[in-house]
Image (cartoon, grey):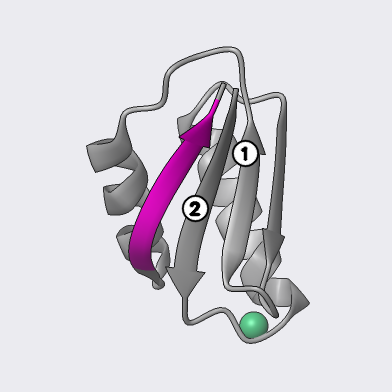
Amino acid sequence: MVYNVEIEGMMCGMCEAHVNDAIRKNFDVKKVKANHKKNLCVIKTDNELNVEKLEAVIKETGYTFKGVTKED
Ligand SMILES: [Cu+2]
């Protein structure tokens, strides 16, 4: 499944790397790709993600979680 996470506050590639690293560290994911221009992070995974934890991880990393949509 794919999670599209809307995130505000990313300004550059370093910010994208912070988000990617934080998600990899906290979740078992196949692929994670943040995009500061789109305010988006796309996560591919075989596991259901805990959305509350996802929100907390993004906040702890210093960005603003705006919402998430899931595609099967
Ligand atoms: Cu940055």
Answer yes or no: disc 2 within 8 Å of ligand 1: no
Amino acid on which disc 1 is placed: Ile
Task: Examine the image and state in which quarter residue 34 appears.
Answer: bottom right
Which residue is pictured at 35% across the width and 66% down the height?
A: 66
Question: Residue 50 at x, y = what percent?
Answer: 31, 28
The quarter of the image that holds ligand 1 is bottom right
Report if the CB atoms under discs 1 and 2 are less than 8 Å apart: yes
Which residue is pictured at 27% across the width and 51% down the height?
A: 56
Asked whether, in this view, residue 47 is left or right of residue 31, the answer is left
Task: Identify the element where label 1 is drawn.
Answer: strand
Mark 2 crowdedness (10 Å alpha carbons): few <14, some 14-19, many ≥20 = many
Residue indicated by mark 1: 43
Residue indicated by mark 2: 5
Question: Residue 35 at x, y = what percent?
Answer: 70, 67
On whether residue 60 falls in the magenta region, the answer is: no
Residue 41 vs residue 24, the one in the foreground:
41
Amino acid on which disc 2 is placed: Val
Task: Identify the element where label 2 is drawn.
Answer: strand
Q: Is residue 70 above or below residue 4?
A: above
Please provide the residue range marked out in magenta.
65-71
Question: Residue 43 at x, y = what percent?
Answer: 62, 39
- Does label 1 or label 2 sit earlier along the sequence? 2
Tell me the chief SS of the magenta region.
Answer: strand
Which residue is pictured at 60% across the width and 22% down the height?
A: 1
- Gap between marks 1 and 2 measured at Cα: 8 Å
